[in-house]
Amino acid sequence: MARKAGSHAEITGPAIQEAALRLFSRSGYAAVSMREIAAEVGVRAGALYLYTPDKQTLLYDLMKDHLEALLAAWEKAKGTGTPLERLETFVGFHVDYHFDLRDKVFVSYMELRNLSDENFRKIQKLRRSYEDELEAILADGLESGAFRFEDVRVTTMALLAMLLGYITWFRGGGRLDKDDIRRIHLDLARAMVGA
């Protein structure tokens, strides 16, 4: 369905995504209706369907956009060097990139259960692309003898769980800031891989 001439699609479309992200993060995908999203944006519920076919597509698009942006940013940030240097780059990047994206991270990882099977497979493929980057670093470190741990896949997932965990408990304005969080996570990552 085409939007009428003079509509503000470049404003309303992103506003719908931002409202959905806020509401999904605060209340959970299942508890949020399209009517609530429309009210948050200040449009009629029917107007949402000019921008998205349904709530499922809205959730999928939020996750896809987050993961595609993450992969593009990592592609620019990653470097070369020893496995330890590459691991340190990955950990620092991950902490810094996600630091101010609490809602996006929460929705992208906690709402996977609400994706349709087809959408889940697509998002899982994007997530796996990012996981593979860390897994390759760990495999290189293990093979070279720079790292000492038992299982590459389990260690990859454990590191990522740790690196995402601070999003759920960290609040600014306390005794720690972003630099502290990055430094501590770097120390923890080195310890986890036996570096």
Image (spheres, grey):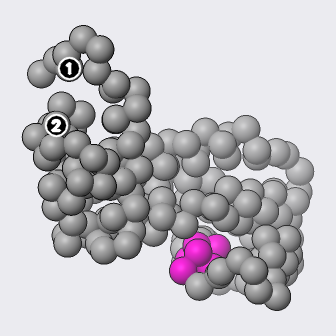
Q: Magenta stretch: dominant SS?
A: helix
Side (left or right) of 171 relative to 173? left
Residue in the image at 81% along x and 83% along y: 176
Q: Amino acid at mark 1?
A: Arg
Residue in the image at 65% along x and 80% along y: 171
Q: Observer-nearest residue: 180 or 122?
A: 180
Q: Residue furthest front?
A: 42
Mark 2–mark 1 Cα distance, whole angstroms, equals: 10 Å
Secondary structure category for the residue under label 1: loop
Marker disc for residue 43: none
Q: Can you tell which quarter of the image residue 106 is in? A: bottom left
Asked whether 90 falls inside the magenta stretch, the response is: no
Residue 14 location, x and y as percent? 40, 39
61 to 98, vertically: above or below: above
Q: Please give the range of residues in magenta.
A: 161-168
81 to 31, vertically: above or below: above
Marker disc for residue 47: 2
Q: Which residue in the protein does label 1 denote?
A: 3
Determine if residue 60 is in view.
no
Q: Amino acid at mark 2?
A: Ala
